[in-house]
Every structure is written in C-alpha cells, then in structure tokens.
Amino acid sequence: MRIYHLLLAMFIVELAIAQVTPNGLFKSNMVLQRNQPIAVFGKAVKEKSVEVIFKSKSYSAEVIDGYWKVFLDESNAGGPFELTIKGRNEIVLSNILVGEVWLCSGQSNMEMPLKGFMGQPINGSNLAILNSENSQIRLFEVPRKISKTLQNNLEGEWKICNPKSASEFSATAYFFGKMLQEKLKVPIGLIASSWGGTPAESWTPKKITDKEFPNFDNWYKNETQPQKFPNGLYNGMIAPLIPFSIKGAIWYQGESNKVRAKQYAQLFPAMVNSWREEWNQGDFPFYFVQIAPLKWGGESQALLRESQLKSMNKMTNTGMAVTLDIGELECIHPAEKQKVGERLALWALAKDFGFEGIQYSGPVYKSFKVNKNKVTIEFDYAPNGVTNFGKEMSGFKVAGVDKIFHKAEVKITKGKLEVWSENVPNPIAVRYGWDAWIDGSLYNTAGLPASSFRSDDWEE
C-alpha cells in the first residue's frame, strides 16, 4: 500500500511537471488586444511544441528551453471567445474578449482604489461604484512583487467590472477605461501594476540604470525599503507582462523622485523607452499625469513638474494630464481621480482613435512678448485662447535683469493673457505656478488646466 501511494504521488508530481502552463495573464475573462498580432506564451517542460487554438484556427509554438510563444493573427474587437492551449494537458479559457488593453502603472496615486484610502476619499466614489457594472470592462491586478532578477510569470485573475471588483481597483485606471469604453464601444482590458511610495528607477530595467545612472547603487546603499531599490519592481511586476500585447500605458508617479527632480527629465524618458524596447511594439502610446500641487516640497515640486513637461516634449507618442487645479494642500492623494482618468482618456481618444474637434491637453507655455512693462504670453494647446473660468488668478511672477521675481497682475482679454508688475519696469522672465502649492486658475476653453512653467532657466 505504501508503495502504491508512493508511486501515485510520483505520478502526480510527474504529471504536474509535464503540464503546459500559460503565463498568468492568460485566464478566462481576459481581454486581448485588437488589430495587432496577439502574443500567447508560457512554460512547458516536457513538450517539444504547444498547440494554441483561437477562433477555430490552430497555431503551433515551439518549446525552447522550457518556454513557448506564438503570435495569433490580428483580430477585430468582439467576443466572447474561447482560447485552447494543448500539450499533454489541455487548458480551455472562456469568455475572452478582444478590444483595447492598457497597462496602468505608477505609485500610490495610480494604486488608490475607487473606494479611496483610509481617511482619503475619491470624489463621487459611491455613485461611481454603483454604476460600475460593465461586462465589457475587465480588470487585472498585478500582485506586488520585488525581485532581484527578471521574472517571467505572475499570479492573478481577470475580473469582470462590477461594484465589487471596481471598488478595489485603481480609480484613475477605472475612469480612464470607462471613458474609452463609452466612446469606442469595444471591450477594454486594464492591467494595474503599481506600488505606493516608489521611484521611477524601481520600475526601470537594470541594464538602463547601470548604463545611464551608475550612482543609484551609492544613493540606495542605506535604503531600508526594498520596493524602492532600482529595478526590483520592473523585474517583479513589469517584466512578467512582456510580451503581452497592449495598446499603450498610462502612468501616475513622480512624487517619490522629487529629491532628484531635475534628473527625472532623463530618468523618466529612459524608463519609457526601455519599456517600449522590451515590448517590441514600437513607440506605443504612453500617457502620464503631472504631479499635483502640495503644501510641502518647496521648489522641488515645481522642478519635478517641469521635468515631466520636458519629458513630454522630448518623447514621441506621449501626453501629459495636468492636475494643477485639483491638488489638495495637505494630501498627496487628490480626490478628483475622475478628472485625472478622463484627462488621460482625452489624449488617447484624440491621438490614437481619431476623435476630432476636441481639446486634449491643457495650455503649454510657448513664448512671450514684452511691450514696455507688460508681458503677453503665448501657449500651445489653446486654439481658442485661455480663460480662468471665473477663478481668482494667482501664481504669476515676473522678473527683470536682477532676477528677483515679483508677484504679477493678470489680465485676460479675448483669450490673450497679459501679466505685469509695477516693480518690474523691464521684465525679461515670467513664471506660473513655480511653487510647491498653487490652486491652478489658467485653462483653455475646454477646461483643461495649464502646466506650471518658467521662461528662464536660472539656478536658485
């Protein structure tokens, strides 16, 4: 009897080892990316090849060093479908949709769920949760994982969007996906991979930080929180997703990089470009959120926002959602996540899905002209001029050759912005929102706020 049990146990172990297993992203209820080749991949120890069947077509994947990958043909949006994976065992995944898949990553502001954090609410969350039932939106939460080495698998499940699943999911990602689904009328898959309090270098591959930022090792030698170490979250929470086919990514992060705010203008684009290189899908859309004003942080807040603006101007196929008008004086997690998600969605709708006639970015400083002591400022992304929507305007400063900034008076006439100070007879520089805290009051006519900016590059 003992021998029988031993043989049975050995058989079960051998059977388990021999099984074909897809990457953990491949589960029932998933969404696959439309209109581009669909990567399906996983492990198989004992097999020489794996068969994948989708929409009545069979594909064969060669097993190399225990891993297999195959690309399915491009597919239009639709479903539900079944996906079958065959080796010595057979796995049938059901209720699969084809639509738009977006990766949603960053730190706590991306992580913040629709129900809010303890003592930190999401505006309108209760109604949003009640109205979240939508079988055309699917949600996947990547488990937290730190790793010193690149990982190629993960756990998790795809959940159909409903009040229970939506309440626990990223509010920013949910509102982004909801707007896309309403306008595109196709399934939306959202993959959330975020961890609060983490810097961009944690989400960046080692080969990039070693080459371009060699001082990271010295800076982090006394760090006691492993999630902040360079590369660890990329290894454990991004690498396992590759090469899952996606449309693009949204990103909400930056607060943890304020101590090296100027460096972010190099670090963030390096991170984005590395993700694009690893996915091998070209320069896929990457939209991100500029950090909101906050009481603390001093000039580093403004410098980080500037680095984010520089990043948008430096990279292709990117866009920035500005939050200068929704910050909270003493809370790093703004409650207006619906505006954040929808501002990100405007970028995608305009740039990726052909929606015309809409404004999708707030005003971005372009140039200024001086007439005596008055400065007229010109902006991109303000085709109908700028406005304040009745808010008290503040945050403007001008300086002369002495480089001393003075609070400026502000006037908007037929969409043109003019600023001046009686203390600066010959202005040569202008700034807006160049402080840790500001209640943004400058918009385009679509109600999208302007980024903070400065015309100078003076060191303080």
Image (cartoon, rainbow, N blue to C red):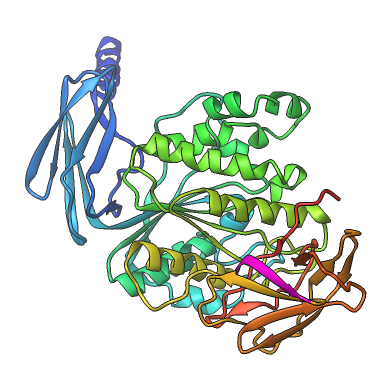
* Quadrant of the image containing the N terminus: top left
Residue 367 painted magenta: yes
Give percent across and percent down for residue 306: 68, 55
Residue 91 painted magenta: no
The residue at 72%/66% (across/down) is 119
The residue at 77%/66% (across/down) is 430
In the displayed image of the protein, which residue is found farthest to the front? 372
The residue at 85%/70% (across/down) is 426
- Pick whichever, 287 or 311, lies toward us: 311
Q: In this view, does 375 lie above or below 330?
A: below
State the count of labels: 0
- Pick whichever, 453 or 67, lies toward us: 453
- Pick whichever, 360 or 231, lies toward us: 360
Residue 241: image quadrant is: top left
Q: In this view, does 417 lie above or below 316?
A: below
In the rendered view, does 267 fall on the left or right side of 138? right
In the rendered view, does 394 fall on the left or right side of 342? right
In the displayed image of the protein, which residue is found farthest to the top? 3
Residues shaded magenta: 362-371
Q: Is residue 432 above or below residue 403?
A: below
Give percent across and percent down for residue 32: 27, 51
Give percent across and percent down for residue 269: 55, 43
The residue at 61%/39% (across/down) is 267
In the rendered view, does 342 fall on the left or right side of 331? left
Give percent across and percent down for residue 60: 13, 31
- Residue 449 seen in the figure: yes
- Residue 161 seen in the figure: no
- Pick whichever, 35 or 234, lies toward us: 35
Residue 188: image quadrant is: bottom left
Q: In this view, does 26 lie above or below 251?
A: above
Q: Is the magenta stretch mostly helix, strand or loop?
A: strand
